[in-house]
Amino acid sequence: MKLEATQLAAQNAPYLDTHDRSWDILRQQMESKGLNTKALLQQLSDLQIAIPSWALGAGGTRFGRFSFGGEPANLEQKIADVGLLHALSRSAGSISLHIPWDIPEDPAAIRELAAIHELTFDAVNSNTFQDQPGQAQSYKFGSLCHHSAEVRAQAIEHNLEVIRIGQTLGSKSITVWLADGASFPGQHSLRGALQRTQDSLQAIYRDMPEDWRMFIEYKPYEPNFYSTVIADWGTSLMLAEGCGPNAYTLVDLGHHLPNTNIEQIVATLMMKGKLGGFHFNDSKYGDDDLTVGSIKPYQLFLIFNELVYGMANNTANNPPLAWMIDASHNLKDPLEDLLQSLEAIRIAYAQALLVDQEALADAQARQDVTEAQEILQDAFRTDVRPLVREARWQDGGALYPIQAYRELGIREQLIEQRGMHTIATGL
Ligand code: LRH
Ligand code: MN
Ligand code: MN
């Protein structure tokens, strides 16, 4: 199904007055502080977030997976779902595919379908953390790090195949996340595994098209519980530098040990021009993949504050970032959940755009710690929702996306079309 502009306009009509009143107040407040509201609206409108194909079904854990009903069963339906999210939010303009879960049988037709929904293809993701049917070698003991040259060759070839598939869709980057590691001390040589991973990544990089980028994701633990080969940003950065200028570190918010200062990692990577992309989610304990902003919204704001600063002071020529939501869980309607995440990301970005960077630099130079904190928290505590809503409305989206989604009966229609007992491919 596809939402038409006229449907959304009719849906918005009764709520426009209320929105206008709150927007007027905020606009005046921002203008009195010397902020350029037109520029802010444009910056918000430009922030487009990729939706991973594996987040569209009800997620799960190894303890169970509960169907939500109306979940997408194939790539065409996944594209339609992201199209719905984009029509409502105007902030989900691309989709990120996981191979082999989403191999396009007819790439030209898939591209055409994506264009109908105004979507492009973001980074493609390789998968060497599961064995696929008919595969000659097993990844049980690793892939790019494996002791056996045959396993490594198979994993390298898979990544190159993912790039070739991505090329047929117009994608320009590959994200490599490895489950490789050890669950017990002594299981493998820590140094040997890292060296082999470096060599394998270099082999992929050598054959990657020149206009492509490679994103190297890190994660401290899970599925391995003693050591992960690419455990942290330092290792990822070292590997990226060992590959070349088109390899970058990718930060997934959930892939840090509790209390890690993620905004500092962002600042460091941007200083080096090596931050390639972001996977947004939220967590209380580990890689919980919860809705963005549901647990630590201040952390999200502080991260965006570094991103905004980094983009405005881009001395190391960090390329534009690849933004993606990487979250899936068991409870909510996945599309409602993604709408909440999209909103949380734009809210944090809008708050960060309100930070008076000059005043902050001045307070820092004077060692006025209180003033510096006041400046950050003044921005964070501003209710920017009318600004985010206005940007979305000007772009033709829904004033209140979740409300619109419910009032238009979208899930009910999806269930009617696709059935009640559906399981989407994915994590
Ligand atoms: C595993 C993970 C990782 C990847 C995704 C494909 O932790 O969530 O973040 O990006 O699977
Ligand atoms: Mn991730
Ligand atoms: Mn993860």
Image (tube, helix red, strand yellow):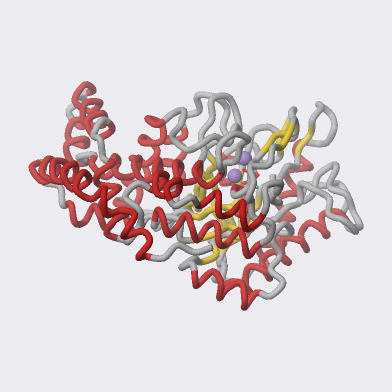
Q: In the displayed structure, would residue 232 be above or below residue 398?
A: above
Q: Position of residue 59 (x, y in %)?
A: 65, 40
Q: In the displayed structure, would residue 69 be above or below residue 253?
A: below
Which residue corresponds to the image point at 22% horizontal and 46% vertical from the top-left?
A: 19
25 left or right of 416 in image: left
Question: Dividing the image into four equal quarters, which quarter contains ligand 1?
Answer: top right
Which residue corresponds to the image point at 27% horizontal and 45% vertical from the top-left?
A: 353
328 left or right of 388 in image: right
Q: In the displayed structure, would residue 9 be above or below residue 139?
A: below
Q: Position of residue 201 (x, y in %)?
A: 69, 56
Residue 244 seen from this side = no
Return the residue found at the far left.
32
Return the residue found at the far top.
370
Question: Which residue is nearer to you in this view: 207 or 217?
Answer: 217
Question: Which residue is nearer to you in this view: 300 or 106?
Answer: 106
Q: Position of residue 39 (x, y in %)?
A: 21, 56
Query: Which quarter shows the C terminus?
Result: top right
Question: Which residue is nearer to you in this view: 372 or 196?
Answer: 372
Query: Which quarter shows the N terminus?
Result: bottom right
Which residue corresponds to the image point at 57% horizontal and 67% vertical from the top-left?
A: 171
The quarter of the displayed image where residue 296 is located: top left
Q: Position of residue 278 (x, y in %)?
A: 50, 47
Residue 81 seen from this side = yes
Which residue corresponds to the image point at 72% horizontal and 72% vertical from the top-left?
A: 105
